[in-house]
Amino acid sequence: MIKKGELVIQVSAMPRDTNPRGDIFGGWLMGLMDIASANIAPKGKSATRAADNIEFIKAVQVGDLVSCYGYVLKIGNTSATVHIDVYVGDDIVAKGDFVNVALGDDGKPRVINQHKKHTPSSPQCLGGLQFEKRSLNFKGSQYEIY
């Protein structure tokens, strides 16, 4: 299977992330998807406005290596819609769309600069938008995300 988009987050599912049945909790997966979408677009400070079409396709087990791939679906004046696919190996286990609103320093929506040019082959470029590498501490584990 060819995975569409860029790899944004890759992490092992841990026992602390399970539901009462022993499967990985869907809320944990959705949280990873939300973090992944925010690191794709828009660049800079943003907030999640909506999560749509979330689908949990297959259960994730403790020890599975979870990979979030994403790409920009749509760019508006102040927001970007990002699609995230979650894989374990070659199997898609979840997917969804996230609308992220760009915010200014005052916390109010800001216009996204859609005219800035980037090299499509750059590792910090996706869908014509630039994003940066960040370190994240999530539930006691350290991650590098783009």
Image: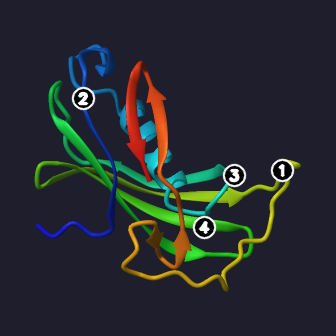
Q: For mark 1, does the 10 Å Cα neighbourhood hold few (<14), some (14 to 19), or many (20 or more) residues?
A: few
Quadrant position of residue 62: top left
SS state under label 2: loop
Please determine whether, in this image, residue 38 is positioned above or below residue 29: below
Q: For the residues marked 1 and 4, what is the alpha-carbon distance in whole angstroms?
A: 18 Å
Q: For the residues marked 2 and 4, what is the alpha-carbon distance in whole angstroms?
A: 28 Å
* Quadrant where the C terminus is found in the figure: bottom left
Q: Residue at x 42, y 47 (%)?
A: 145
Residue 45 image label: 3
The answer to whether marks 3 and 2 mark residues whose Cβ atoms lie closer than 8 Å is no
Q: Which residue is mark 1?
A: 105
Using residue 68 as the reference point, say whether residue 102 is left or right of it: right
* Quadrant where the N terminus is found in the figure: bottom left
Does label 3 or label 4 sit earlier along the sequence? 3
Q: Residue at x 74, y 75 (%)?
A: 77
Q: Which residue is mark 4?
A: 80
Q: Residue at x 39, y 29 (%)?
A: 142
- Could you tell me the amino acid type at mark 4? Ala
The answer to whether marks 3 and 4 mark residues whose Cβ atoms lie closer than 8 Å is no
The answer to whether marks 1 and 3 mark residues whose Cβ atoms lie closer than 8 Å is yes
Labels 2, 1: front one: 1
Q: For the residues marked 3 and 4, what is the alpha-carbon distance in whole angstroms?
A: 12 Å
Does label 2 or label 4 sit earlier along the sequence? 2
Please determine whether, in this image, residue 43 is positioned above or below residue 12: below
